[in-house]
Amino acid sequence: MDISVLGIDLGKNSCSVVGLDAIGKVVVRRRMRRETVITYAATLPACVVAMEACCGAHHVGRALARQGHAVRLMSPEYVRPYVKAQKNDDRDAEAIAEAATRPTMRFVELKTEEQLDMQTLHRIRDQLVGDRTSLMNQIRSLLLERGYIVPQGRAKLALRLGEMLDGDEPVLGSRIHRLMSDMRLRWRALDERIADLDAEFTDAARADERTRRLLTIPGIGALNATALVAAVGDARTFGRGRDLAAWLGLVPRQATTGGKPRLLGITKRGSRYLRKNLIQGARASLPVMSKSDTRLGAWLRGLLSRSHHNTVVVALAAKMARIVWALLRHQRTYDPVAQAA
């Protein structure tokens, strides 16, 4: 049996497998358990193995790559147009195999276990930050119900809460006092866990040569550097810097018809976490960078003179994404002097 492309529709327990020959004809159509897929692929000669980039795909892909197969991962939205007639697992596997043969298809780089570990740490930290924000908002609402208005800011809330709980005279009722004390302990525990993760990101950024290059860019700290390296991996996956910015959803949406281009807001595609962090870094570095005597500073001053501040922040974030690609692709460090002249 000559199989050129093996399409796998991954499931939690069972998977659908479709094999195509050299001319694209279906020669294999089977259903098997996830662990059996790797055993079955080991009996085949080296071929192209295609899967959707979903949960567990990178683990299976690494196992198949060790067997000598060429693994191609694709975004599910790019596979969907190739599904024929009714949607089922067999049709999905056939669509995955067919999509992998298209010369214009965009593939996802197979991530290493270290990259997935770093992305997991970022997801955990983002969840902890969300839990802390939710807890702080709950504390504010409970105090507001009792007539105590606290200004915005984490430090101001901590100071006001300390004055109310640690004072000599009780301010709140005994039951609410105990409740607020317990919530403050949970808040401090979240702060400690987030600080531990931040220290881990800082150590990881200093140990990796790629992240050290990114740290030279204004607005890119250890958090952004480690997240970008873990997500991007090999910068050669993207042909140019704009492709990385588009992958992060930082380029304008297009609605062009009849040869008349029309640009709208940013696409907001890709990772919301990476896009959020880049925009926050751009917002923090914009005041300093716009005053610098460099070509980038002159570009920012021109944008600020004719565009809204938030628009300039997003444009700077897209520019930072392009710089990230250039540094990773050409193995260089950011030189602000080279931007001048």
Image: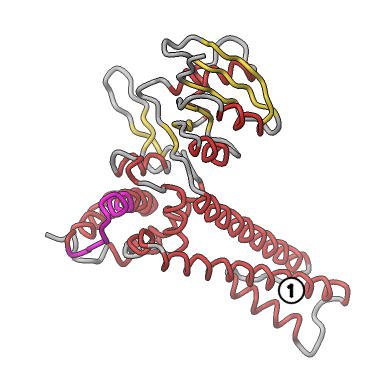
| Percent x, y of residue 279 | 42, 54
The relative height of residue 141 versus residue 252 in the rendered view (above or below) is: below
Residue shown at 34% from the left, 48% from the top? 318
| Percent x, y of residue 259 | 26, 20
| Percent x, y of residue 124 | 61, 56
Number of numbered tags placed on the structure image = 1
User: Is 146 left, or right, of 297 in this rendering?
Assistant: right
Q: Callout 1, which amino acid?
A: Leu
Residue shown at 35% from the left, 24% from the top? 104
Q: How is the image coloured?
A: secondary structure
Using the rendered view, name the quadrant where residue 151 is placed.
Answer: bottom right
Residue shown at 61% from the left, 31% from the top? 39
Looking at the rendered structure, the secondary structure element under dot 1 is helix
| Percent x, y of residue 164 | 74, 80
Q: Nearer the viewer, residue 13 or 249?
A: 13
Q: Magenta span covers which residues?
A: 323-337
The residue labelled by disc 1 is 185
Q: Quadrant of the C terminus?
A: bottom left
> Furthest-bottom residue in view?
168
Q: Nearer the viewer, residue 40 or 238?
A: 40
Residue shown at 68% from the left, 73% from the top? 188
Mark 1 nearby-residue class (10 Å; few <14, some 14–19, many ≥20):
few
The relative height of residue 120 versus residue 6 in the rendered view (above or below) is: below
User: Is 293 left, or right, of 247 in this rendering?
Assistant: left
